[in-house]
Image (spheres, helix red, strand yellow):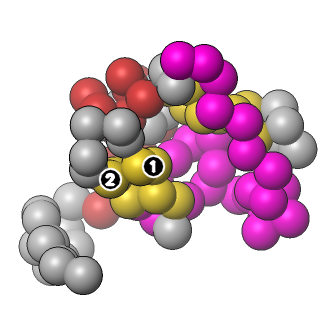
Amino acid sequence: MITVDLSAGYSISFHKSRAQALHNATDEQLSEIDAEFPGWSVFFPKLDDGFTVEGLLAGRQGSPYWEREWAAQHRDEEAPLHHVTAA
């Protein structure tokens, strides 16, 4: 799981398979992370790729084509659209 803790006091978590930049990444490739000031992007140097916090908050985790393909592949899953847990 990738978890982004925001200074506003909440976190966003998602499985790496959901993000185009990370879906094939190994744990080793994800072991180094740079948050570019002022925290607008998350970059994985070993992948030479990453994502923006703005895109993450907007639900964009890849190109429009990636998003359409991901949605089509997961459309028929019986998982709930939202799952909330409290720690």
Q: Are marks 1 and 2 in contact (CB under 8 Å)?
A: yes
Give the residue drawn at x 41%, y 49%.
Answer: 5
Q: Where residue 3 sits: x, y (%)? A: 46, 58
At label 1, which amino acid type do we have?
Val
Secondary structure of the residue carrying tag 1 is: strand
- Residue located 40% across and 59% down the image: 14
Please state the horizontal and vertical placement of residue 74, each as a whole percent of the image: 30, 62
In the rendered image, residue 19 lying in the magenta stretch gets the answer yes
Tag 2: amino acid: Ser
* Rendering quarter of residue 25: bottom right
Front position in the image: 30 or 67: 30
Q: Which residues are magenta?
A: 14-38
Image height of 37 relative to 5, above or below: above
Q: Circle 2 sits on which residue?
A: 11
Relative vertical location of residue 37 with respect to residue 26 in this rendering, above or below: above
The residue at which mark 1 appears reads as: 4
- Give the prevailing secondary structure in the magenta stretch: loop
Left or right: residue 46 compared with residue 57: right
Residue at image location 44% in from the left, 37% down from the top: 61
Q: Is residue 49 left or right of residue 57?
A: right
Q: Which residue is located at x 60 percent, y 18 percent?
A: 37
Decide: few, some or many residues near mark 2? Use Cα within 10 Å; few <14, some 14-19, many ≥20.
few
